[in-house]
Image: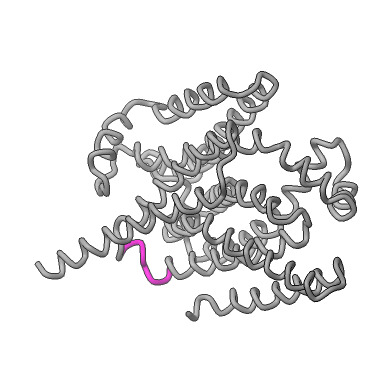
Amino acid sequence: MKYFRGSFLVTVAGLAAGAALGWDIHGTIAGVLGTTFIVGVLAVLEVSLSFDNAVVNATVLREMDPLWQRRFMTWGIAIAVFGMRIVFPLAIVAVIAHIDPWNAVVLSLTRPDEYSRIIASAHVSVAAFGGAFLLMVGFKHFLNKDKQLHWIALVERPLVSVGRIEAFGLGIVLFGLWAVAAWLPERERYEFLVAGIFGLITFIGVDGIAAIVDPADVAAGAAARSGAAAFLYLEVLDASFSFDGVIGAFALSNNLLVIAIGLGIGAMFVRSLTIMLVDRGTLTQYRYLEHGAFYAIIALGTIMFLGAVRPIPEAVTGLVGAGFIGLAFWHSLRDNRREGRA
């Protein structure tokens, strides 16, 4: 529990801030309790949707040098909490509504219904960008021709074989973009395809930085593993994971401050979980946990694509990700016990 002490302190402070905000908005005890409850639900939503993110973060962090590990745990988490949960939605509103950032802040505080409507209108672009990036991250892991350990061998061995084909994963994602766009109304197809292409370009750009920093790692099929390249990789990855949580939060509240507090509490728990996984070597102890996280990433990317056509409840997204990781943990534990008896 020592890893989560800071998170519990942030939770207490966040719930207190939510209660104060509820009193300021409603001026009643019922309003205070309702706002505090929504903050708590948002925190749980963020943790459930980002559990696989913590495992992937730990996968990258364990191979980073200690200096950049500390930088990500301080600066990186600050960027994730304030950048993705506050600045990113404001930037979307500013671009779509053609207003400056300050007026976007004013809009969020004075006309929250209009603010949430504008955020929701960007769902198709966000789904395409985040889905394309996450699918490329997942395929990068499973199409690695040097991958030795397999969890679901029936699926993973053929993927390793086809991984020898250059840009095979890129072709799959491009086909997915085309297939989903064909189901969208004509006015949304262009923005979906453009946003998806930018998601692919972002992944290629981050991977290119990794190649400049450490070509050997990229040749081995690994993502950025050191220094600024790994830091950038993790930030973009966190952003992609956070898209669905940020947009889904508006189903519970359209108040920017309430959303920021709730998701911020959840992000702190994800940070604590990531530190614990790295310090305790959990990914080494439970060999399939990393596989489960990357299956969850592919599932989340697919859900984001499909969500552009038909809304998918956030509970489904969270349960699918947690299900893959839970199964991977159970299989790892079972194999560890078998080896121990042997």
Q: Nearer the viewer, residue 300 or 70?
A: 300
Q: Which of 331 and 249 is in front in this view?
A: 249
| Percent x, y of residue 160 | 29, 36
Q: Say left or right for 37 vs 63.
A: right
Colour option used: one colour
Is 154 a magenta residue? no
Quarter holding the C terminus is bottom left
Residue 228 makes an appearance in the image: no
Q: Residue at x 81, y 46 (%)?
A: 115
Q: Residue at x 74, y 62 (%)?
A: 258
Vertical arrangement, residue 121 with respect to residue 31, above or below = above
Query: Image quarter for residue 77?
Result: bottom right
Task: Give the residue at the far front of this rendering.
Answer: 30
| Percent x, y of residue 98 | 86, 35
Q: Give the range drawn in magenta.
A: 278-284
Q: Residue at x 44, y 49 (%)?
A: 320
| Percent x, y of residue 162 | 30, 29
The prevailing secondary structure element of the residues shown in magenta is: helix
Residue 256 makes an appearance in the image: yes
Vertical arrangement, residue 160 with respect to residue 48, above or below = above
Q: Nearer the viewer, residue 307 or 226?
A: 307
Query: Image quarter for residue 122?
Result: top right
| Percent x, y of residue 262 | 67, 64
The image shows a total of numbered marks equal to: 0
Vertical arrangement, residue 150 with respect to residue 160, above or below = below
Is 281 a magenta residue? yes
Q: Say left or right for 107 vs 174.
A: right
